[in-house]
Image (spheres, rainbow, N blue to C red):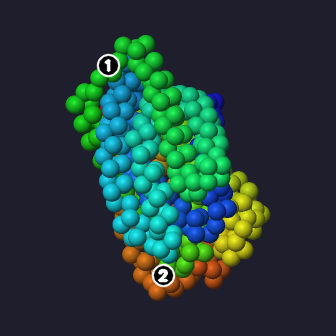
């Protein structure tokens, strides 16, 4: 079992690490345009990641469905379900792109920041909206391949795609002198190329197995209906993350820029920890699809322990680097200092993050999405109003060494994760989520 976990987790880890590394490079490239540009990227990226994140069920839900049907012995039906998910990705992506492009100025204004920050954020967001369909197709295709127990193909596509993204960003931001708009254009081009490569891979597999390629309304509706709980879960999570950006904006552009740095690194660490969560989804779904409850429980417990251990390791890596990470993104000493204090909190929170992310993945693989939605909404309903109230008027939140941004991250990285962790632990300790069969 450990060998199977590592076979799936290591390529998934490298894939997930590749994405934040190149996102870090994007932040560093834009950051050297100035504090205002970096703050604008923070505003725009929080909205864009929300727009993409709410549809993350296209990856996670597809992984679970495909893995269960594969475990039940029907690979053709598994691929057919994944193809329906891809059609859903295209439709949702086109709709979301139009909404995001039209609403960009109002969305950026709602987050906050100076007029210059909002202007640049709107430019970045409107250009990025063009790439939304491709981004969602990448999610759907990646979920299909992971469900088929293939994490290597997404790795190759991610490395090539994000490598091209860095080259394009450098060429367009500095070479062509397009500034923050060049970063957005480069990302759109890279994401489109990645989507094309993954679709070709899926088409080859579907043709080999004789799986239907045309859209089937019933299958698309099943995929959409199955994704509703994960959509609710993700909306609740993104609501919390948006709230952190709103609170950071209350402290001014310097703290907002530093928050962008810390959130970028946090996402990178989350992607790294998610490698085990992805392995958990694929292995749990396949085992339960085949009716193997014992192996599913054993693998889940092993991966939960590994998640805590991996979180401790990542925390120990971040701790001594905390004073220096911000320098990679900004030459502003005030921004670097604000980020340094927050990184101390991030380091402390990693063991908890490891547990939460992996158990979240186990329950996704089991298709226990209603519980995940209820638990996330419950944590958000408690955290958001209390934190907004405690930070009203720019008040510094306690627990962050007296520093505004560190206090915010103490409440988010430790407080909010603890709320999530309690709900996930309560569900994980019982056996109600261990439901067998090709479908839940």
Rendering coords of residue 105 (x, y %) = 38, 64
Q: From the image, which quarter does the N terminus lie in?
A: top right
In the displayed structure, 101 sits above or below 324; it is above
Rendering coords of residue 347 (x, y %) = 67, 63
The residue located at (49%, 79%) in the rendering is 250
Residue 408 visible in the displayed image? no
In the displayed structure, 35 sits above or below 176; it is below
Rendering coords of residue 427 (x, y %) = 42, 52
Outermost residue, front side: 176
Looking at the rendering, which quadrant does residue 28 occupy? bottom right
Q: How many marks?
A: 2
Q: Residues within 10 Å of mark 2 (few under 14, many from 20)?
A: many
The residue located at (48%, 37%) in the rendering is 192
- Compute the Cα span from label 1 to label 2: 53 Å
- Relative placement, left or right, of 315 versus 149 is right
Residue 391 visible in the displayed image? yes
Label 1: which secondary element = loop
Rendering coords of residue 312 (x, y %) = 68, 56
In the displayed structure, 215 sits above or below 123; it is above
- Residue to which mark 1 is pinned: 212
Disc 1 or 2, which lies upstream in sequence? Answer: 1
The residue located at (35%, 18%) in the rendering is 211
Looking at the rendering, which quadrant does residue 373 occupy? bottom left
- Residue to which mark 2 is pinned: 391
Q: Residues within 10 Å of mark 1 (few under 14, many from 20)?
A: some
In the displayed structure, 391 sits above or below 136; it is below
Q: Nearer the viewer, residue 419 or 135?
A: 135
């Amino acid at each position: 079992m450990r060998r199977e976990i590592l076979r799936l987790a290591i390529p998934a880890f490298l894939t997930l690490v590749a994405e934040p590394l190149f996102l870090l490079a994007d932040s560093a490239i834009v950051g050297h345009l100035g504090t205002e540009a970096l703050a604008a990227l923070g505003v725009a990226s929080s909205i864009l990641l929300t727009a993409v994140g709410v549809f993350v069920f296209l990856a996670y839900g597809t992984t679970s469905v495909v893995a269960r049907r594969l475990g039940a012995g029907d690979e053709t039906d598994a691929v057919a379900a994944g193809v329906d998910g891809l059609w859903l990705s295209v439709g949702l992506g086109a709709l979301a792109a139009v909404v995001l492009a039209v609403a960009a100025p109002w969305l950026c204004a709602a987050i906050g920041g100076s007029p210059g920050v909002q202007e640049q954020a709107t430019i970045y967001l409107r250009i990025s909206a063009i790439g939304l369909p491709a981004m969602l197709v990448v999610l759907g295709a990646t979920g299909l391949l992971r469900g088929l127990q293939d994490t290597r193909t997404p790795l190759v596509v991610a490395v090539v795609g994000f490598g091209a993204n860095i080259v394009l960003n450098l060429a367009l931001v500095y070479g062509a002198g397009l500034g923050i708009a060049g970063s957005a254009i480069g990302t759109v081009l890279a994401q489109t190329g990645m989507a094309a490569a993954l679709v070709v891979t899926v088409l080859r597999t579907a043709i080999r197995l004789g799986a239907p390629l045309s859209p089937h309304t019933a299958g698309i509706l099943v995929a959409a209906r199955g994704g509703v709980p994960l959509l609710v879960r993700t909306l609740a999570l993104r609501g919390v993350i948006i709230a952190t950006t709103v609170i950071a904006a209350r402290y001014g552009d310097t703290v907002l820029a530093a928050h962008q740095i810390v959130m970028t690194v946090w996402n990178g660490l989350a992607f790294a920890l998610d490698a085990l969560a992805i392995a958990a989804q694929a292995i749990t779904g396949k085992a339960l699809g085949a009716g193997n409850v014992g192996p599913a429980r054993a693998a889940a417990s092993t991966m939960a322990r590994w998640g805590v251990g991996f979180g401790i390791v990542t925390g120990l890596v971040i701790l001594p680097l905390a004073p220096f990470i911000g320098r990679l993104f900004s030459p502003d000493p005030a921004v670097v200092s604000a980020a340094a204090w927050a990184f101390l909190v991030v380091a402390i929170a990693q063991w908890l993050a490891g547990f939460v992310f992996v158990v979240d993945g186990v329950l996704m693989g089991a298709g226990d999405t209603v519980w995940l939605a209820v638990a996330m909404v419950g944590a958000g309903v408690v955290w958001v109003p209390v934190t907004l109230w405690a930070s009203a008027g720019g008040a510094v939140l306690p627990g962050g060494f007296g520093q505004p941004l560190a206090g915010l991250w103490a409440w988010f990285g430790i407080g909010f994760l603890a709320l999530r962790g309690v709900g996930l632990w309560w569900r994980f300790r019982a056996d109600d989520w261990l439901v067998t069969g090709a479908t839940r």
